[in-house]
Image (cartoon, helix red, strand yellow):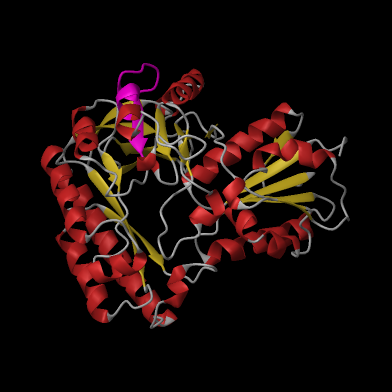
Amino acid sequence: MSTTKSVALHTLGCKLNYSETSAIERLLENDGFVKKDFTEEADVYVINTCSVTENADKECRLLVRRIQRKAPQAMVVITGCYAQLKPKEIAAIDGVDLVLGAAEKFNITKHLQDLTKGDSAKICSCDIEEVNGFHSSFSISSRTRTFLKVQDGCDYNCSFCTIPMARGKSRSNSIENVLADIKKIAKEGVKEIVLTGINLGDFGKNDEGQKKSEDFYNLLLAIEENEGVERYRISSIEPNLLTDRIIELVAASKKIMPHFHIPLQSGSNKILASMRRRYRRELYAEKIALIKNLIPDCCVGVDVITGFPGETDEDFNDTVAFLKDMDVSYLHVFTYSERSNTYALNIKPVVPINVRNNRTKILRNLSYKKLQDFTQKHNGETRKVLFEGADKNGLMEGYTDNYIKISVPFKNEWTNNIIDWKIQ
């Protein structure tokens, strides 16, 4: 492997994965590798996988086949959630050379040194119970927006979810180390940081899963008082962990953007109980009401799963009616897919695939309408937009503080700048 100099990386899944891919990329560059685009020929390809849905698994296999056709002599490394959950299954894919589990992804340079093309795939993994370290990660793919990992793992056991098996127990960075990461990010000229985690609101547990004196509210308070980066966003946060004082802090903040993404998953209390969620729809409604009372122009995104086992037409209609009544801005709709070793496999009756897909279509149409209504409500307002640098056929894009997407004719001088813009 001493002659290997180029590497191409690809990310499947969540914002947290993007932050970790960037951290892996920096490790490889520090070891002498030159980064290439994933569409180019490279000596090593690294795929950081997700396993939330079956499609993510299929996409991983598809990418490996593409690499085989394009660069058959290249080394192929698979890491991420899929690699932790099903290492033997991945190792059996033709063309895969190295499978790195959750504890080994950041030791990639060491493992590459001993790798030879043509040998059987090497698996470097361990039981998820043994994974307890926290590795600081953030993405620097552009100077505009960075995803900063502050928390990892999850102690919840939702009946549909494999993430605790893929990521391990909840653990966090310290506030001191987060502020040190922010200082590094600020030096790159980044204007906005998205705080990410697997269960972000659970911030404050150490490597052993023990609660520290710090919590997510304390982190936000420290960020509010910290200089260097102008804008922050909170990525997905569980409704039962979104405390009133967090909402109050965001309402008073000039740095933390008026934007929440709060998973609901179902508007039926029966289904929420089957999912083993730690709240009911009444609590969710209370959180939305408080947000809209304190921050009327706040953007609120929602995760919803359709076709969960046992979901009747009545249960689904409850979800639709609940979401129609909620003052939310958009939906991320996921069609339920069976995942190995999850309790949901025991729940009957199974909802037919065509019914699941139809329900997904209904909610995505509702999401479109919600987003249109939210955007139109702010027509005529002047809001601060952070513009990104990509020239897309003569246009550039940016987001308002409350996450309305704006497209305007490209102006290079607006790249990575916050501009007052009248929405129309």
Residue 347 % position (x, y): 40, 77
335, 164: nearer the viewer: 164
User: Which quadrant: the N terminus?
Assistant: top right
Q: Quadrant of residue 358?
A: bottom left
Please tell me which residue is depicted at 65% across the width and 31% down the height of the picture. Answer: 26
Left or right of residue 84: residue 240: left
Residue 414 image point, x, y percent: 39, 27
Residue 19 vs residue 419: left or right? Answer: right
Evaluate whether residue 268 shows in this view. Answer: no
Q: On screen, 310 above or below 237?
A: below
- Residue beneath the point at 32% across and 27% down: 218
Find the magenta span and give its range: 220-234
Classify the position of the C terminus by image quarter.
top left
Q: Residue furthest left?
A: 293
Vertical order, 303 against 36 (above or below): below
State the image quarter where residue 82 is shown. bottom right
- Describe residue 163's horizontal placement relative to residue 406 as left or right: right
Of residue 125 and residue 312, the one placed in the foreground of this image is: 125
Residue 109 part of the magenta-drawn span:
no
At which x and y percent is residue 384? Answer: 27, 30
Viewer-side residue, 178 vs 128: 128
Measured from the top left, where is residue 185 in percent x and y?
49, 24
Give me the residue at 30% from left, 71% from top.
362
Tally of marks: 0
Q: Is residue 370 visible?
A: yes
